[in-house]
Image (cartoon, grey):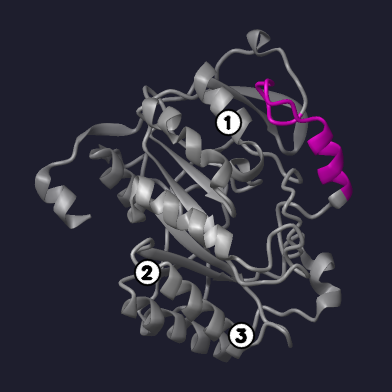
């Protein structure tokens, strides 16, 4: 079983105390996002959890306690987003991303660059965020992250998600096919110069000509390499709960929509500021569930939790990864 923490909210930035408490107690309770009264109790131990994928725009609150995560014996890695947008789009992130870049570098030095993946997404275009802007900003950030990142994930803004109303007034678009191809080719070329590879996230556009493949953010190969173990064919199966174009293997998300305080205008998972404020007021770091409270003793553990590791990787398999 893979734990995703979380596509729905930034647990490392805002809920790291709660997350470490859940690791200490060895379980977490989640709510069905479509039925708040449906609670599920999930184990968080190395007997059943094969890996944890942490999604964040600021891992700083987690850094001093990574030893506690290491002590669980559960493999983990970070999807760390650094984008160059201003506070018109990212109102609660610094316009100057120097501090976030330094956090990225510290984390990479601590756990290794293969386990800290740089996300430059979503890519969007406007009069302010032009082709020239992106080229300049990406090259500058890549230079600063040289040696700290080996993999970059890119995606272009999906205009069909919940973020549409938030961005309509900002003159933003996802770009034409020509714009996407031009910028992708530039990003791939710059990345190669810094020893980085580029992949897309849930993108329909074919960028093979640029040397960019369709990626897997929850990545079976990376998990096997970190763990030194093989996943079964079922463990490597596509996540049926994600978009058709998503290449991720199956995972269980422990986050909650509309609980992220970054306030990014383009975010599909956190689109209602009123709901975010109301939800955050209900957060208790001691609670088994991220928002609100519950009595976990009244809940049985989810029945189908199990590891999909089948045994150690052979040396020749490790060399191929």
Q: From this viewpoint, which residue is outermost toward the right?
A: 274
Q: Foreground mark, 2 or 3? A: 2
Badge 1 vs badge 3, beta-carbon distance below 8 Å: no
Q: Residues within 10 Å of mark 1 (few under 14, many from 20)?
A: many
Q: Quadrant of the N terminus?
A: top left
For the residues marked 1 and 3, what is the alpha-carbon distance in whole angstroms?
37 Å
- Disc ID at residue 296: none
Q: Where, by quadrant of the figure, is residue 255 drawn?
A: top right
Q: Is residue 202 above or below residue 277?
A: below
Secondary structure found at label 1 = helix
Q: Which residue is mark 3?
A: 133
For the image, the number of numbered tags is 3
Q: Is residue 315 above or below residue 126?
A: above
Q: Which residues are magenta?
A: 274-291
Q: Is residue 219 above or below residue 89?
A: above
For the residues marked 2 and 3, what is the alpha-carbon distance in whole angstroms?
20 Å
């Amino acid at each position: 079983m893979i734990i995703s923490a979380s596509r729905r909210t930034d647990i490392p930035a805002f809920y790291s105390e709660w997350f470490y408490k859940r690791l200490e107690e060895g379980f977490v309770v989640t709510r069905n996002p479509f039925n708040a009264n449906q609670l599920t109790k999930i184990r968080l131990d190395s007997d059943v959890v094969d890996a944890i994928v942490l999604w964040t725009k600021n891992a700083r609150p987690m850094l001093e306690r990574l030893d506690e995560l290491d002590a669980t014996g559960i493999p983990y890695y970070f999807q760390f987003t650094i984008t160059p947008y201003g506070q018109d789009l990212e109102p609660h992130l610094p316009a100057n991303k120097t501090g976030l870049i330094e956090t990225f570098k510290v984390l990479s030095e601590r756990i290794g660059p293969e386990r800290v993946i740089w996300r430059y997404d979503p890519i969007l275009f406007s009069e302010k965020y032009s082709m020239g802007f992106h080229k300049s900003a990406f090259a500058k950030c890549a230079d600063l992250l040289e040696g700290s990142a080996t993999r970059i994930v890119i995606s272009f803004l999906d205009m069909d998600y919940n973020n549409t109303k938030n961005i309509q007034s900002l003159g933003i678009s996802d770009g034409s096919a020509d714009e996407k191809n031009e910028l992708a080719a530039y990003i791939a070329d710059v990345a190669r110069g810094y020893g980085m590879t580029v992949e897309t996230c849930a993108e329909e556009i074919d960028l093979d000509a640029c040397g960019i493949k369709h990626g897997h953010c929850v990545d079976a190969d990376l998990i096997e390499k970190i763990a030194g173990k093989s996943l079964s064919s079922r463990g490597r199966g596509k996540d049926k709960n994600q978009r058709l174009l998503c290449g991720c293997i199956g995972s269980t998300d422990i986050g909650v929509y509309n609980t992220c305080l970054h306030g990014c205008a383009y975010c599909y998972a956190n689109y209602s500021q009123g709901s975010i404020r109301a939800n955050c007021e209900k957060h208790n770091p001691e609670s088994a569930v991220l928002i609100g409270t519950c009595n976990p003793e009244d809940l049985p553990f989810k029945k189908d939790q199990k590891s999909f590791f089948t045994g150690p990787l052979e040396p020749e398999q490790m060399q191929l990864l």
